[in-house]
Image (cartoon, rainbow, N blue to C red):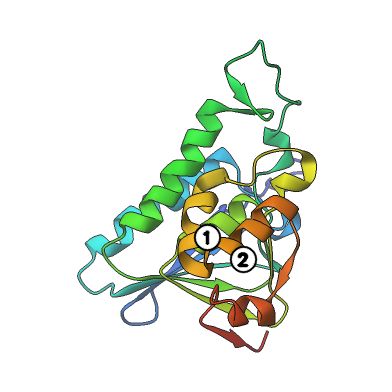
Amino acid sequence: MTDGAPVSADPAPIEVDTSTAGVGLIRLNRPERLNAITVGLARELRASLIELPQDPGCRAIVLTGNGRAFCAGADQELVTSPRDPADPSTRGGISHEVLDVFLDVIRAVRAAPVPVIAAVNGAAVGAGMALAVAADIRVAARAASFHVGTIRVGLTGGEAGLSWLLPRIMGMSRAMELLVTGRPLDALEAAAGGLVSRVAED
């Protein structure tokens, strides 16, 4: 508190909007960090994915990001250091506990009893790409792009279910090219390859 002015609370890491009949809209809300995932964001996202369908009026969930990115993946604050082979509690510099929290979100997307639609409004990177790929339907803005991400820093490209889901959506050859090269995929190529259903205006 400064000069009697109240200190504003940090904004919620996600926003949930149910104002449109039948639709639960979830927005990742860390635009200043390109909606990078923290443990807190992941836990709130998982809770919303479980709670929204409990309302019988919710017939679909739309997942998107605030600002210019869909999701930049794991927040770099969670990445401690390169993996130490002598330390079994880390994998690629991220603790197993954090990885489990991310995987719980992917499981919640896949287990949702209503369709989950990823409205990919910008870059979807690493775990953010996995989040989009886990959805039942993907619609991409023209500005959207998809990046496996981790392979470019010497880690596996199979994080958060990508290596299981991507070949089932795009076919093995296309999926493997992305997983082993980390080559970015723009919205039009993603549509041509079957990763997204259609491309929309930004």
Q: Quadrant of residue 2?
A: top right
Q: Is residue 184 left or right of residue 120?
A: right
Q: Residue 164 appears at what percent x and percent y?
A: 47, 52
Q: Is residue 102 left or right of residue 185?
A: left
Helix, strand, or loop for circle 2?
Answer: helix
Residue for point 56% across, 53% down: 12
Where the N terminus falls, by quadrant?
Answer: top right
State which tag comes first along the sequence, 1 or 2.
1
Q: Residue 57 appears at what percent x and percent y?
A: 23, 74
The count of marks equals 2
Q: Is residue 135 left or right of residue 10?
A: left
64 vs 149, nearest the viewer:
149
| Kind of residue at disc 2 | Arg
Residue under pointer 2:
174
Residue for point 49% across, 49% down: 161
Which residue appears farthest toward the left when viewing the image? 56
Tell me if mark 2 has few (under 14), some (14-19) or many (20+) residues whose alpha carbon lies within 10 angstroms of its own: few
3 vs 124, nearest the viewer:
124
Residue under pointer 1:
166
Tell me if mark 1 has few (under 14), some (14-19) or many (20+) residues whose alpha carbon lies within 10 angstroms of its own: many
Above or below residue 80? Residue 36 is below
Q: Gap in Å between the C-alphas at discs 1 and 2?
A: 9 Å
| Kind of residue at disc 1 | Leu
Of discs 1 and 2, which sits in the foreground? 2
Residue for point 61% across, 82% down: 192
2 vs 82, nearest the viewer:
82
Above or below residue 197? Residue 161 is above
